Amino acid sequence: MTTTQQSPYPPQEPRCVCGSGPGGGSGPGNVPGPGRDHPRGPAGEDAPGHGHGHGHSHSHGPAAPASKRLRTVIAAVLIPFAVAVVAGLVVLWPGGAPAHERTGVGFDRQTQKATVTQVVAVSCSSANVPGGAPAGDPAAGGSPPGGSSTGRPPSGRCTKATVRVDTGSDRGRTFTEIVQPDQSRQLQRDEKVVVAYEPSAPRDLQYAVTDVDRHVPMALLAGLFALAVVVVGRMRGVMALVALAISFLVLNFFILPAVLGGADPLVVAVVGAGAIMLIALYMCHGLSARTSVAVLGTLISLVLIGMLGSLFIGWAALTGNTDDNTGLIHGLYPSIDMSGLLLAGVIIGSLGVLDDVTVTQTSAVWELHEANPAMGRRGLYRAGIRIGRDHIASVVNTLVLAYAGAALPLLLLFSIAQSSVGTVATSELVAEEVVRTLVGSIGLVASVPVTTALAAVVVAADRPSPGAAATPVGAPPPVRAGRGRRRRR
């Protein structure tokens, strides 16, 4: 004989669970029947002792840990990758950049800190600057040797600055610098500057002002950035700053010295980017299945970017040697593969934006599952991809504008020359940026469906273990946790 438990609430009319898509459709799992209807209390909340039928508590705190089976599958993929990254770090570790004799050109020169102690106005003709004396460093805005920046003899009043060297073996030594009126940078008294030192030059020409000392404003700006991150992000912000510092350490102590040491730039970039990705993501977001899915999505997208970058850099015959800096690198280290260095830059440059996209998509799918645990993998994917489409539009636009902003002076030069769009886009200087932008954007676009699909599969497959006790047919559903109420929309 079966006894029936009486509900303390008034009887309700049967309700049909309606919807569309996997987990929410009108399939057999959603047909009204015993144990499927949900009596409601006076305030519209679930009556005590009744649940949603799926027996899942979907509180909106941190994501529930993945099942043992899922952890095993994810670990089977990520542990070999992490081992390969560590092995690559050990094998390719350079132990420091190789030494070379300084050329005195560009950044490859000795520099010291100095202070402008006195500034007086003098006649350009009396200062022996008839358009033929060197005055300042061309790279820092000064006129080139052999004349003024316009190629005409200077007119008007020049500036004679007395500069004191503050560091190095010549500390306290002074020299004079003539600044022409058409130079973009004019020296001021008590201004902190950077001077270049060339020991092989005549004594009165060994030092020259090359730049302004910007340590104080740059340090202040970095401090404001760190403060903003910590105030808003709190402990997550602190971990993000630590991860950022580790990324710079990997870049400065592994990637750059290994490339200079003759290692393949592509292999070095893949190993270095893998190390940065694992450290940054797990440090900022914790060791969880959610983070592991983001790592997998990032890894797959990086592989796609590497393949496309290698194909189109080779097909477009991009050498990677397009300006004075890359030419100097190639002159000092002829063994470096400059096209491989270009590809390495594409991979490393795309990593930071990929992290943002994959973490956002993974979190979106997890939150959708928490809000509606009955939603199947197809429903989760469709809802997540709708979020991802908005993300794609904003991220791609950001990436293109970032590259365009960096190349703005170059684009202005093409505009002044009245070159056609086709000529500008196919020149090697611009083609490098176009390939870098489009390959990175393709990887970003691909990361959205890839990561969303991975997250949907992982979340939908994370079911209770087969050995868990099943609810008897006709019995009331399990009691739902007190914190398991659905959010109001």
Image (cartoon, grey):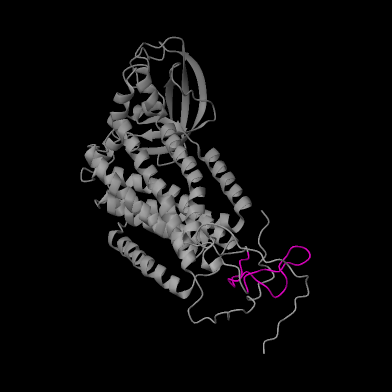
**Residue at the far left in the pictured view:** 335
The magenta-colored residue range is: 35-59
Residue sitting at 63 percent across and 51 percent down?
A: 231
Q: Is residue 235 above or below residue 191?
A: below
**Residue 306 x %, y %:** 31, 49
Residue 259 seen in the figure = yes
> Can residue 39 be found in the magenta stretch?
yes
Residue 9 horizontal side relative to residue 132, left or right: right
Dominant SS type (magenta) = loop
**Residue 183 x %, y %:** 43, 20
Depth order, front residue of 266/376: 376
Q: Is residue 127 above or below residue 369?
A: above
Residue sitting at 58 percent across and 61 percent down?
A: 372
Depth order, front residue of 356/390: 390
> Can residue 408 be found in the magenta stretch?
no
**Residue 326 x %, y %:** 29, 37
**Residue 177 x %, y %:** 42, 24
Residue 62 horizontal side relative to residue 7, left or right: left
In which quadrant will I find the N terminus? Answer: bottom right
Depth order, front residue of 113/63: 63
How many numbered circles does the render carry? 0
Residue 346 horizontal side relative to residue 312, left or right: right
**Residue at the far bottom in the pictured view:** 1
Residue sitting at 37 percent across and 70 percent down?
A: 76
Query: Where is residue 219, by image quadrant?
Result: top right
